[in-house]
């Protein structure tokens, strides 16, 4: 399916640079980046290790503010909208280290995130919706009720994906979301991302080293030496 091209961007980065500084040195990781991420589109960000992919994701997802330039959501500068408000209401993130609440079950991790974002399930309530989403990533209701520390790395990664999916937000970010998954499960997650973008009109932005994943996205953004280039995948 060809993604829509005329949709206004959900997210824009204009003239974004980012520098990390400590007492000994300053490292400019991103240099004057302009790019946009539209709804209904599945984006991937590729680049060598250390090229700044996670940094770019942390700015786009409102975890950090750029040293220079602006990041805006639906035309509103995040600095004015408020990073916390943006994170809670408009986007959700699957972190590389999962960031699950380790004293909770898989199910509680998902329902708690739904409460925070105010996700309103259409029918059956939060718990039923959470179980449904966990099932969609291959975690049955018995597994859903286990403490997350009793799950394997791949199962924890799927809880992190389910938690982000269950929050009905405009933009879903994910940092290496298939890194710990076997081929079939990884493909299942990719299919879910594609459906989120093409079926539900969400903006999906995934950082990855996987060419297989990038090949299935609509737009591939490649970071190299602080600069971002873009390629549209045609199928
Ligand atoms: N908090 C920080 N303070 C100082 N330097 C940092 C910080 N976070 C990242 N960096 C540096 O910024 C550069 C980009 O890091 P980043 O994690 O964004 O890259 P990446 O492309 O996601 O890497 P990988 O693919 O290995 O996860 C690296 O040189 C890293 O050492």
Image (cartoon, grey):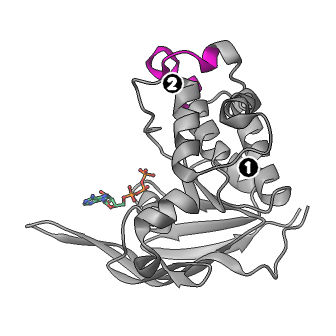
Count how many numbered circles sit on residues in the image.
2
Identify the element where label 1 is drawn: helix
Identify the element where label 2 is drawn: helix
Q: Earlier in the sequence, mark 2 or mark 1?
A: 2
Residue drawn at point x = 39 percent, y = 23 percent: 103
The N terminus appears in which quarter of the rendering? bottom right
**Whole-percent x and y of residue 82?**
42, 72
Can see residue 103? yes
Q: Is residue 146 magenta?
A: yes
The answer to whether residue 64 is above or below residue 69 is above
Q: Which mark is residue 153?
A: 2
The C terminus appears in which quarter of the rendering? bottom right
Q: Which mark is residue 228?
A: none
Residue drawn at point x = 86 percent, y = 55 percent: 199
The answer to whether residue 15 is above or below residue 193 is below
Q: Are marks 2 and 1 in contact (CB under 8 Å)?
A: no
**Whole-percent x and y of residue 138?**
72, 25
- Specify start and end residues of the magenta stretch as a single range: 143-157
Residue drawn at point x = 43 percent, y = 39 percent: 99
Instruction: Give the quarter of the image for residue 164.
Output: top right
Q: Residues within 10 Å of mark 2 (few under 14, many from 20)?
A: some
| The one of 82 and 13 positioned closer to us in this rendering | 82
Question: On the picture, is 42 further left or further right than 117?
Answer: right
**Whole-percent x and y of residue 23?**
8, 67
Q: Is residue 45 magenta?
A: no
Can see residue 179? no
Question: On the picture, is 80 further left or further right than 152?
Answer: left
Instruction: Give the quarter of the image for residue 203.
Output: bottom right
Q: Which mark is residue 193?
A: 1
């Amino acid at each position: 399916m060809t993604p829509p091209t005329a949709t206004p961007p959900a997210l824009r980065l204009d003239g974004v640079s980012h520098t990390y500084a400590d007492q000994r040195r300053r490292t400019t990781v991103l240099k004057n980046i302009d790019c946009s991420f539209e709804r209904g589109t599945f984006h991937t960000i590729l680049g060598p290790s250390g090229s700044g992919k996670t940094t770019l994701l942390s700015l786009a997802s409102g975890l950090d503010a750029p040293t220079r330039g602006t990041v805006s959501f639906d035309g509103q500068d995040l600095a004015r909208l408020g990073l916390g408000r943006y994170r809670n209401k408009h986007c959700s993130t699957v972190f590389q280290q999962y960031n699950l609440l380790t004293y909770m079950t898989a199910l509680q991790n998902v329902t708690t995130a739904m409460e925070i974002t105010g996700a309103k399930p259409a029918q059956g309530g939060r718990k039923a919706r959470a179980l449904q989403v966990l099932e969609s990533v291959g975690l049955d209701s018995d597994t859903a009720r286990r403490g997350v520390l009793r799950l394997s790395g791949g199962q924890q990664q799927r809880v992190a994906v389910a938690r982000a999916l269950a929050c009905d937000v405009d933009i879903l970010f994910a940092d290496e979301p298939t890194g710990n998954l076997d081929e079939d499960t990884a493909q299942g997650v990719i299919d879910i991302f594609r459906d989120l973008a093409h079926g539900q009109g969400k903006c999906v932005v995934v950082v990855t080293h996987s060419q297989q994943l990038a090949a299935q996205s609509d737009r591939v953004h490649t970071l190299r030496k602080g600069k971002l280039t873009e390629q549209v995948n045609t199928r």
